[in-house]
Amino acid sequence: MQSERGNRAILIHEVGLRDGLQVEKTAVPTEEKIRWIDGLFESDVDIVQVGSFVHPEKVPQMADTDRLFALLTAPGRKPERVTLSGLVLNEKGLDRGMASGVEMFCMGVSASETHSRKNTGMSTAEALSRIVPMARKAAGAGKKVQVSVQSAFGCGFEGPIAKEKVLGIVKEYLAAGIRDVSLADTAGHAHPLQVEEMFGAIRELDPAVRPACHFHNTYGLGLANCYAAWRAGAVSFESAFGGLGGCPFTKIPAGNVSSEDLVHSFQRMGVRTDIRLDKLLDVARMVGSYFNRELPGFILKSGSLVDFKKAGE
């Protein structure tokens, strides 16, 4: 089955260096991260999220984010086809990102009041009043910008989140002229029918919106939700090598959808066959070896049904 959207119409946004590592207790040296990033470059994924610009005492794994960007944005250091993204939570983080050479800024607001306060120390409304001007500033500087609604499908503290609240945040983004909008399943509560409904609803708000998705595998529905989002028109998919990750400020931190599993499932359907799945698996093995444990990803354990040579032809 070949996607009607075309082989390169969807984007794979690798977030393992940020979302994958932020809950890990074992520090990863900059040099080791560089090894993994080079492997991701070789895999031909579209976007690599290098890190987040947060206080190093709160998230020690992100203490070298500025240095990583400085190294990776040196002339000729990375493939031109790859975009380097960074997560920012506030104006100070945005300024750091601007100075470090971030190519794509990711920023967002939680639809859960409890999660918002735990994650940013602000209410949803307060966070939104700051994120929208930040997004405009970054876009005005010629940067790519993706805004998100976190806890869009439910919250570990509050339970169900009203669809109207999620769409209200999306409307504010669209009114600001930002069309790259991600719905993040921070607590892993989403199910496929809910995903189809929500992505259908944001596309009804503005047909020009470019929907992105970010699913956690807390209850085992991550890949199913990715498929539902794809069917509903999502064009960008965030995932992490080996299935690492989880928000440290949600009730049950759980891994992301595994990048290898996601790419493998798309390639089984004839979609994004240009991505080097073997290189993604190599990165996941390096990560698993570094942490000395088996990672959650399935293809890493079961092996692939995709012929790497044919997939890349």
Image (cartoon, rainbow, N blue to C red):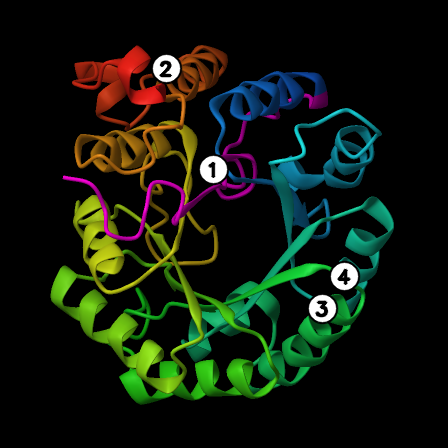
Q: Is residue 178 left or right of residue 244?
A: right
Q: Is residue 1 left or right of residue 33?
A: left
Q: Which badge, 2 or 3, is on the more N-terminal residue?
A: 3
Residue drawn where x is 35% and y is 70% of the image: 152
Q: CA distance from mark 1 to mark 3?
A: 26 Å
Q: Which residue is mark 2?
A: 278
Residue drawn where x is 42% and y is 13% of the image: 282
Q: Amino acid at mark 1?
A: Gly
Q: Which badge, 1 or 4, is on the more N-terminal residue?
A: 1
Q: Is residue 253 left or right of residue 225?
A: right
Q: Which residue is mark 3?
A: 139
Name the chief secondary structure element in magenta. loop
Please name whichever residue, 242 or 115, is drawn nearer the observer in this view of the structure: 242
Please name whichever residue, 168 or 247, is drawn nearer the observer in this view of the structure: 168
Find numbered disc 4 in the image and state the secondary structure of the residue it sits on: helix
Residue drawn where x is 74% and y is 48% of the image: 102
Q: Amino acid at mark 4?
A: Leu
- Segment tinted magenta in the rendering: 1-30
Q: CA distance from mark 3 to mark 4?
A: 12 Å
Residue 66 horizontal/vertical position (percent): 79, 41
Q: In the rendering, which numbered label is found on residue 20? A: 1
Q: Which residue is mark 4?
A: 94
Structural crowding at the residue carrying mark 2, measured as other residues with C-alpha within 10 Å and reported as few (<14), some (14–19) or many (≥20): some
Q: Nearer the viewer, mark 2 or mark 4?
A: 2
